[in-house]
Amino acid sequence: MGSLLTTYEWKTPCSGYKPESIGNFHIVRRTIPSGTALGVDAMSIDAVVFRKPTDCIMLREGKKDGIDVGSLWMSDTPKEYYMAWELVVRARGDVLVGGLGLGLLVHLLRLRKDIGRITVIEKSSEVVQMVSKYMPSDVEIICDDFVYQMQILSEKGIKFDTVIADMWKTGEEKDVVEDCKAIVDDCYPNAVKLFWALQEEIDNDNAKLGLFNMDEKEREMFQKTAMRVMMES
């Protein structure tokens, strides 16, 4: 069962970013009005209510102003912040990240002292130019296509314990996402593999598969336990 959080001040590692435009990309600062409730649906949090006007940072492509969702690459709003944490807590060892965005995921990974080398692959040189100056100095950023460069790194024998891919699943991109997942599996079969915005769907599919693989007695016990938890929540 989720929860409703209230905040009078929202600060993230991206809060200090300066508004900037390079080419077709823009870092912008937007004020969220007092009383606004933003859905989260991550880390057992349903929504966050802002009690005071609060600034958030956004990375946009194309349209600098307005509310066009299609031009929004990333933000540091509560939803994306807590979604990032859901991936960060599952990472281990040396980490390969596909997609830089605002670098929020990288900042949170670096807060974990047990995380080793962090390598980020970002295809947009404009995004790299704007965001790289805010990244921890020990983070390597490679400007290239994620799938192509990941295969190069794998062929060179460079090992990663975790691979995190920033992918959104839409109708036209479904095949691309599936292909990317297959290549990650091929390059780093033993790594923890996490997919931004798709992880819940993947976890649910794996849970269903695990249920199907149970014998009849195990399945009955699982279903009784799940029903009891639902009744008690």
Image (cartoon, grey):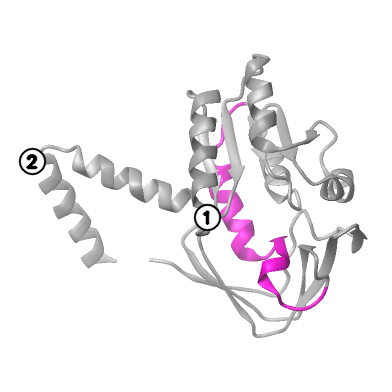
**On screen, residue 222 above or below 30:** above
Near mark 1 (Cα within 10 A), the count class, few <14, some 14-19 or many ≥20, is some
Q: Position of residue 24 (x, y in %)?
A: 85, 60
- At which x and y percent is residue 14? 79, 56
**Residue 47 at what x, y percent from top left?**
54, 72
Residue found 29% across the figure and 66% down from its top: 233
Amino acid type shown at disc 2: Lys
- Range of residues picked out in magenta: 65-93
Mark 2 and mark 1 lie on one chain; the one further toward the N terminus is 1
- Camera-near label (2 vs 1) is 1
CB atoms at circles 2 and 1 under 8 Å apart?
A: no
- Tell me, yes or no, if residue 112 can be seen here: no
* Residue found at the very far left of the displayed protein: 217
In front here: 147 or 189? 147
Vertical order, 203 against 4 (above or below)? above
Instruction: Describe residue 15's horizontal placement relative to residue 69 as left or right.
Output: right
Which quadrant of the figure has residue 93?
top right
Residue closer to the observer: 45 or 22: 22
Residue sitting at 22 percent across and 44 percent down? 211
Which quadrant does the N terminus fall into?
bottom left
* Magenta stretch contains residue 220: no
Q: What residue does disc 2 label?
A: 217
Determine if the magenta segment contains residue 84.
yes
Q: Is residue 181 visible?
A: yes
Residue at image mark 1: 169
Tell me which amino acid carries mark 1. Lys
Location of residue 98 by image quarter: top right
User: Which type of secondary structure does the marked residue at label 1 adopt?
Assistant: loop
